[in-house]
Amino acid sequence: MKKFLKFGCLGFIGLIVVIIIIAVATSGGDDTSTDDTSINNSTESKDKSKEDKKGSLTKEKFGKIKEGMSYEEVVNIVGSKGTVISETGEEGTDLHTIMYEFETDGFMSNSNMMFQGGKLINKAQVGLGGGSDVEITLDQFNEIKNGMTLEEVVSIVGGEGEIISESGEKGSSAHTVMYSYTGDKLASSVSLMFQGNKLQNKSQFGLE
């Protein structure tokens, strides 16, 4: 429009007439003067934005990914392929183990998925958001004992933490889950690892 205004009023009117004539001649009487290029660019921009969002791993997508899924199933959920960061064993065998890193949409976040024999055996993430609001104090941390069930720990601290790593079939003795909690002091944190619903390891940083 800025370019059109430079022509002055008469130049502008003349240009509109020319556009109408060309439109009639090329479209059988349709005098629509919509800028197709502008629409196409706008549409492509929106599609690209949706594509970028679709191809990033979110907290919601991470929750949908389950033990035993194939790489193709995981890619279908994430919306993009992962990058190989580690590989051992001969391809096609049960011992073939491969770890992929997936693009995430959180600030300073990352996620890794490990497959063995073509099946997901571990998923891990940091910084995807949606973490637990539960804060743990040093007294609560000291009260927590190895061997406790998740339910017993939850009764002490007031809720579940954010799952940052999970492997094994849920409900089995091999099911291993790592929870992350925020400490009640600035920059403090707590990690709790359960296997078969029993606490196997607890660690903390910055609690006083």
Image (cartoon, helix red, strand yellow):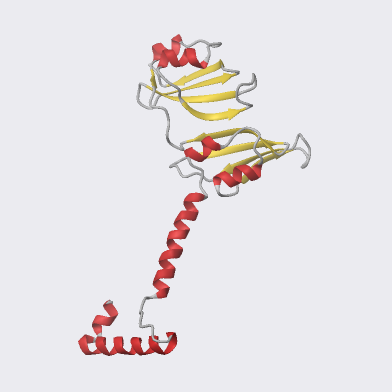
Q: Residue furthest left?
A: 9
Q: Write the residue at 53% across / 13% down.
A: 149
Q: Write the residue at 36% across / 21% down.
A: 184
- As drawn, 19 above or below 83: below
Residue 143, picture quadrant: top left
List x then y, in percent, for residue 114: 64, 36
Q: Nearer the viewer, residue 143 or 21?
A: 21
- As drawn, 68 above or below 36: above
Q: Write the residue at 33% across / 90% down.
A: 18
Q: Nearer the viewer, residue 124 or 59?
A: 59
List x then y, in percent, for residue 41: 43, 68
Total residue callouts: 0
Q: Is residue 13 left or right of residue 121?
A: left
Quarter of the figure that contains the C terminus? top left
List x then y, in percent, for residue 131: 43, 31
Q: Is residue 191 left or right of residue 10?
A: right
- As drawn, 150 above or below 93: above
List x then y, in percent, for residue 5: 24, 81
Quarter of the figure that contains the N terminus? bottom left
Residue 171, picture quadrant: top right
Q: Is residue 75 left or right of residue 186?
A: right
